Image (spheres, coloured by chain):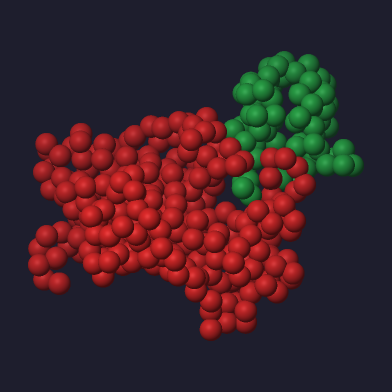
Amino acid sequence: MPRWDVYQMPVDTGYFTPLGLQPTAVCRLGFNAAGRWLSEHTLSHRRLVADYQTGFVVWSAQLSLDEPIKFVDADCLEMRVTGRIRGGGTQFECEVEVDSASGTTTRMQACCVPLRLDDDPSLSGTPARLRPEVMGTFLPDEIEIRPYRSPAPGLRAAVGRDGTVLARGRTPFVIHRHQCEVADQWYWPEAVSLASGGREELVRVESGRVPSLRLGLSMPLRRLDLLFNRPFFLFDEGAVLSSAHKWQGRLVFVHELVGVEGGEPRALAIEQFTLPSERACN
Amino acid sequence: MMVRVSGALLRFTDYRRVISVAAPTVGAALIRLADEYRPLKPVLFDREGRVRATHQIFLNGEQLNREQLTRPAGDADSVDLLLPVSGG
């Protein structure tokens, strides 16, 4: 049986918006939970980097949210986390469940690509299969041969093909250190914050013309899909290219995070909000 | 030539992003840069003095492989040092 960790996390108001638990906070708590699981059952993130020259970069993540978890629900969140290797050691996947006392659950699933680090202070590395001695710390039930496939590219294509575009916008940004991790590379949950900012700007600017966009502020997020191609680094300049769509009875925001140099988006974020009529049907 | 340094390497160049380097080739420019900014040396070069494979180097937008670092470059040329990903 795969090993799970269960523990309590005290809440503070900074994890929440008026609508519920912040998606960025879920990603930060979830990544911390995965690190806790690795440390408890395999090797700590610090030892992986320092002793095994192994780093992880998040490549894909999904959040799915039931009814919102509210600050006043309970003093603590219950965190449940497990991890496993996929793709013959080319991926590490973690599953995290955040439960509230009210019985609602937020789920995060993230898939990381292992890096073989060079022995330099910048922690530079290249994607590589996990070392056998690292693989050996996982149970047989925690190793799956099949690689994880991100649903994000297919979802973006479906929304673009079958949805109705409501509005488009561009929100520039610069990456600063408080948004970065130990190597002056953005900490991946920042993609969620930047995408949220792109959505809020789009609503702020365009909701006079398209009133239904306000649902992107008044309704809680139900699902978030993330895909990462290349990170941003300290002082990198970029922009969130946001588009709002009506698709399958949902309000969907597609965000491409691009560098000023152009080229392929460095990250993709797709936010889905359930419209009131569909909620009434469920 | 002008050498442009990307975000993860900035702390090794005292946060200078664009640095003028006088050298006859791209490879020679990287050596001079690492001589001027000593913390950059172990980041850019391995113990054998080779440019680490984890860095990408561009001359006027064209990516160079290790063998092409002997490419001549002058005052009007620009070199970009890019770290595609870091394992923090």
Who's the residue at 50% across and 66% down the image?
A94
Side (left or right) of B32 relative to A77 = right
Q: Is residue B25 above or below residue A248?
A: above
- Observer-nearest of B21 and A196: A196
Res. A115 visible in picture: no
Who's the residue at 27% across and 66% down the image?
A101
Q: x, y percentage for residue B35?
A: 82, 24
Number of marks in the rendered image: 0
Q: Quadrant of residue B72?
A: top right
Q: Is residue A143 above or below residue A156?
A: below
Q: Is residue B51 above or below residue A280?
A: above
Q: x, y percentage for residue A44?
A: 63, 60
Who's the residue at 79% across and 20% down the image?
B36
Residue with the most extreme right position: B48
Side (left or right) of B74 relative to A55 = right
- Observer-nearest of A221 and A244: A221
Q: x, y percentage for residue A205?
A: 20, 34
Side (left or right) of B69 relative to A274 = right
Quadrant showing the C terminus of chain A: bottom left
Res. B51 visible in picture: yes
State the hue of chain B: green
Who's the residue at 37% across and 44% down the image?
A193
Q: Is residue A132 above or below residue A234?
A: below
Q: Which chain is red?
A: A
Q: Quadrant of residue B12?
A: top right
Side (left or right) of A276 relative to A63 = left
Residue with the most extreme front position: A75
